[in-house]
Amino acid sequence: MSAHDTAVELVASRLDEAQRSATPVRPQEDWPHLSLDQAYAAQARLVERRRERGEQEVGLKLGFTSEAKMRQMGIDELIIGVLTDGMQVPDGGSVDLAAFVHPRVEPEVAFRFGRDLDLADPALQVADLRAALTGVAAGIELIDSRYEGFSFDLPRVVADNTSAAAFTIGPWVDPAGVELGDLPVTLTIAGEVAAAGTTAAILGHPLSTLPHLLALGRRLGLSLPAGSVVLAGAATAAVPLLTGDVVVRVAGLGEAHLTGI
Ligand code: OOG
């Protein structure tokens, strides 16, 4: 194993253990310096560990696609992470808060693609992604940084699979029937509006994320088998999740529901 592989393996195993034990890591102590490429390699290794435990990949998520998120976390570069079936919570389902370090929730717009898309294929164009879109929905993403204090820089959050922890998607809607550009979004926790914004906060329009999805997917050699889900990134800053019902409502699109217990 090269020094590069050893650093990647060490980071992936530390983060994997942190996630499984809901005990944060302290990156300031004894943490290898990671380039962005090494960070994505560590992320891939982390996902491989989930696969070895029987989880299956179900899609991808984008991060830092809104000003609100960039400002909240101090990072202004788009990132991509992997979603697995082990993270998916049925709409209206519940999550045990004890399984997470310091969970936060965010309102999302979700995409579903109806055919196999090899993002690494240089012939694949943004128009192909748009044509393959068979569903759009409101979603909730539960993020949970595995770093103490929810504190990280760009390579660290990438290695940590972009804080991906759990997600819920509301009923799918035919994309032909909805103009996603500027829909009011609310995130309600235990009956109180905790965050509000608009889908325009996501790069001006949620579909503006598609060129970034393609560029990042191409660079990393990712693919989206038919039926895959993509979360376009939060429209508002993330909010700490306490016990109670979480509702994301995207006016004109629908709702997603989750309960923290
Ligand atoms: C990283 C994940 C960011 C989003 O929607 O912008 C993200 C984090 O804030 O911990 O999922």
Image (spheres, grey):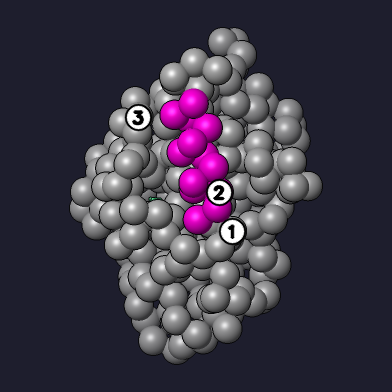
The answer to whether mark 2 and mark 1 are in CB contact below 8 A is yes
Does 225 sit above or below residue 107? Answer: above
Q: Residue furthest bottom?
A: 191
Q: Distance between the Cα atoms at labels 2 and 1? A: 6 Å
Residue 162 seen from this side: yes
Instruction: Give, as a three-letter code, the residue at label 3.
Output: Leu
Residue at mark 3: 34
Residue 132 is covered by the magenta coloring: no
Q: Which residues are magenta?
A: 6-18
Q: Nearer the viewer, residue 226 or 17?
A: 17
Q: Residue at x 61, y 40 (%)?
A: 47
**In the image: residue 12, left or right of residue 24:** right
Q: Residues within 10 Å of mark 3 (few under 14, many from 20)?
A: some
Residue position for label 1: 20
Left or right: residue 128 compared with residue 181: right
Is residue 254 visible to us here?
A: no
Tell me the SS state at disc 3: loop
Left/right of residue 193 with respect to residue 260 in the rendered view: left
Q: Say which element carries label 2.
A: helix
The image quarter in which residue 167 lies = bottom right
* Location of the N terminus (image quadrant): top right
- The quadrant of the rendering that contains the C terminus is bottom right
Considering only order in the chain, which callout, 3 or 1, is on the residue closer to the N terminus? Answer: 1
Q: Which quarter of the picture shows residue 203?
A: top left
Residue at label 2? 16
Residue 155: x and y in percent read: 35, 35
- Taking the spot 66% from the left edge, 41% from the top edge, the residue there is 49
From the viewer's side, name the closer residue of 66 and 51: 51
